[in-house]
Image (spheres, rainbow, N blue to C red):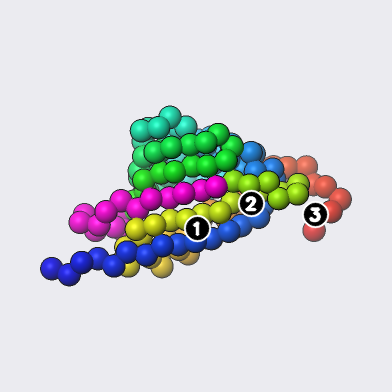
């Protein structure tokens, strides 16, 4: 049997909200669900289960540094049973009035790499920007 090739995804996005607010949105099950348009189970407690898209993505919250860092084990239903869990690291950094999210997602199997990589943009970052535009008061400098 061949060994699965594992990949790392690195992405950075700047969104029009403070970094702490971006963190809170990701960690709040109701806001997170609104953002992605599907049920979410999430908690800041280390060892707590994580679930998104109604169970299509599952894992465990491994560690958090409130308003700064989230580390989760993570797997998609498209991972093979023999694939290891991937590890997701999200860091939240202030950037002027905005917030920057640096995403590092390691151990993503080749079989689901394109789906996971594209999914971060299409299922998270693009809807997140749209969600913020609908839920935050606009300021003069926004387009």
Q: Is residue 120 visible?
A: yes
Labels 3 & 1 near each other (Cβ < 8 A): no
Q: What secondary structure is marked by label 1? A: helix
- Lower position in the chain sequence, tag 3 or tag 2: 2
The answer to which quarter of the image holds residue 50 is top left
In the image: residue 115, left or right of residue 23: left
In the image: residue 18, left or right of residue 31: right
| Residue topped by disc 3 | 142
Whether 83 is drawn above or below 40: the answer is: below
Q: Is residue 132 visible?
A: no
Task: Tell me the chief SS of the magenta region.
Answer: loop
| Residue topped by disc 1 | 120
- Residue 102, how many percent across, how many down? 56, 54
Q: What secondary structure is marked by label 3? A: loop
Seen at 78% across and 42% down, the residue is 137
The magenta stretch is 77-91
| Residue topped by disc 2 | 100
């Amino acid at each position: 049997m061949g060994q699965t090739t594992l990949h790392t995804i690195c992405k950075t996005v700047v969104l029009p909200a403070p970094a702490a607010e971006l963190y809170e949105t990701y960690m709040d099950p109701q806001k997170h669900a609104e953002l992605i348009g599907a049920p979410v189970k999430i908690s800041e407690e280390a060892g707590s289960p994580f679930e998104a898209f109604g169970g299509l993505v599952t894992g465990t919250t491994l560690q958090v540094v409130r308003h700064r860092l989230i580390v989760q084990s993570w797997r998609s239903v498209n991972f093979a049973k023999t694939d290891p869990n991937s590890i997701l690291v999200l860091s939240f950094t202030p950037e002027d009035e905005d917030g920057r999210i640096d995403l590092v997602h390691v151990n993503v199997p080749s079989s689901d790499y394109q789906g996971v990589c594209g999914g971060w943009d299409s299922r998270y970052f693009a809807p997140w920007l749209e969600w913020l535009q609908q839920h935050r008061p606009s300021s003069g400098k926004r387009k």
